[in-house]
Image (cartoon, rainbow, N blue to C red):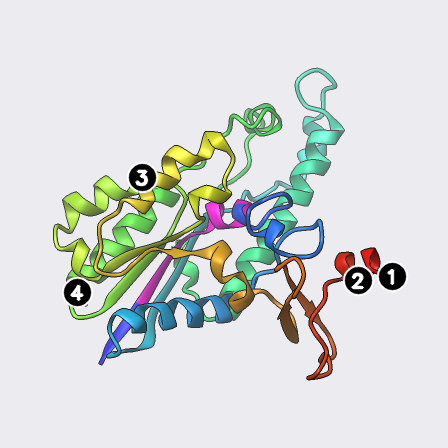
């Protein structure tokens, strides 16, 4: 029996779940998409099994991301010229959110070895504020882990979750047989802003025996919540703490409010 090995660009997926993203727009609320990593793994496994029914279990699970380690004396860096109190507060909020995201992956049995915690340096803060800071190691780690697994576990299937088309040439070069058992999970290009579509279409063209897994099309399968439904009116996904009666048509809050 074959296994499915999962490799996630966690920095990209964190942003892909953010407010205003294609995934969050699939749900009833205006906030971030609440992802259940265990359900995501099971949805990916079901997708692989449709291509090969012998793929029945999940093997390796890696989420690679970079979460800055904030020094205890970071407030001393505030100079009112290049570093401001708002920078520190925004950074703390971002790091806290990324920590929670990574921890939810670890709770779903992802390997912690690909999560990096580089020390914050003062020169990084202006770049973070201006969104010019470039994370290191994440893309290379995802490719290296996937290629190693594909070579060692040649009879398995391997999925890479990414929105960065730059990882594909590296996979093609390092593992020429990629089309047999490697596939991509990403966001459908039709759901992206125009500036992101070129990369998404390149990911779509990644030739494989397994079709791409489009996250936004499967959102109901891995959103967090006790009872998950798809609205019968707008087709958006929502969750409830208690089940909706069997004979009632699922209706999200915005649609319910507009009809009453």
**Element marked by disc 3:** helix
Nearer to us in this view, 98 or 150 = 150
The mark lying in front, picked from 4 and 2, is 2
Instruction: Verify whether residue 6 appears in magenta.
Output: yes
| Marks 1 and 2 in Cβ contact (< 8 Å) | yes
Residue at 65% from the left image edge and 51% from the top image edge: 32
Residue 228's image quarter? bottom right
| Marks 3 and 2 in Cβ contact (< 8 Å) | no
Question: Mark 2 sits on what residue?
Answer: 256
Q: Quadrant of the C terminus?
A: bottom right
Alpha carbon separation for disc pair 3 and 2: 39 Å
Residue 50's image quarter? bottom left
Question: Mark 1 sits on what residue?
Answer: 260
Question: Mark 4 sits on what residue?
Answer: 152
Question: Mark 3 sits on what residue?
Answer: 202
- State which tag comes first along the sequence, 1 or 3: 3
- State which tag comes first along the sequence, 3 or 4: 4
Alpha carbon separation for disc pair 3 and 4: 27 Å
Residue 83's image quarter? top right
- In the image, taking residue 235 as reference, residue 135 lies left or right, namely left
Percent position (x, y) of residue 214? 42, 55
């Amino acid at each position: 029996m074959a296994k499915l090995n999962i490799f996630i660009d966690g920095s990209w997926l964190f942003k892909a779940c953010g407010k205003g993203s294609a995934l969050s727009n699939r749900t009833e609320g205006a906030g971030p998409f609440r992802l259940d990593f265990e359900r995501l793994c099971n949805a990916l496994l079901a997708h692989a099994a449709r291509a090969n029914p012998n793929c029945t279990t999940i093997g390796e699970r890696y989420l690679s991301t970079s979460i800055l380690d904030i020094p205890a004396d970071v407030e001393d860096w505030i100079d009112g010229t290049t570093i401001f109190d708002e920078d520190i507060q925004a950074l703390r909020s971002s790091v806290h959110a990324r920590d929670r995201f990574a921890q939810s992956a670890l709770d779903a049995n992802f390997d912690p070895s690909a999560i990096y915690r580089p020390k914050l340096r003062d020169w990084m803060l202006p770049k973070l504020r201006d969104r010019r800071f470039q994370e290191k190691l994440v893309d290379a780690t995802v490719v290296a882990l996937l290629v190693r697994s594909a070579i060692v576990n040649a009879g398995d299937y391997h999925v890479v979750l990414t929105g960065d088309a730059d990882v594909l040439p590296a996979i093609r070069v390092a593992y020429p047989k990629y089309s047999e058992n490697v596939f991509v999970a990403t966001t459908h290009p039709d759901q992206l802003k125009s500036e992101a579509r070129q990369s998404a279409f390149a990911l779509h063209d990644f030739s494989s025996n397994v079709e791409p897994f489009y996250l936004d099309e499967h959102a109901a399968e891995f959103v967090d919540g006790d009872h998950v439904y798809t609205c019968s009116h707008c087709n958006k996904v929502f969750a409830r703490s208690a089940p909706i009666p069997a004979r009632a048509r699922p209706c999200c809050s915005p649609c319910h409010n507009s009809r009453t």
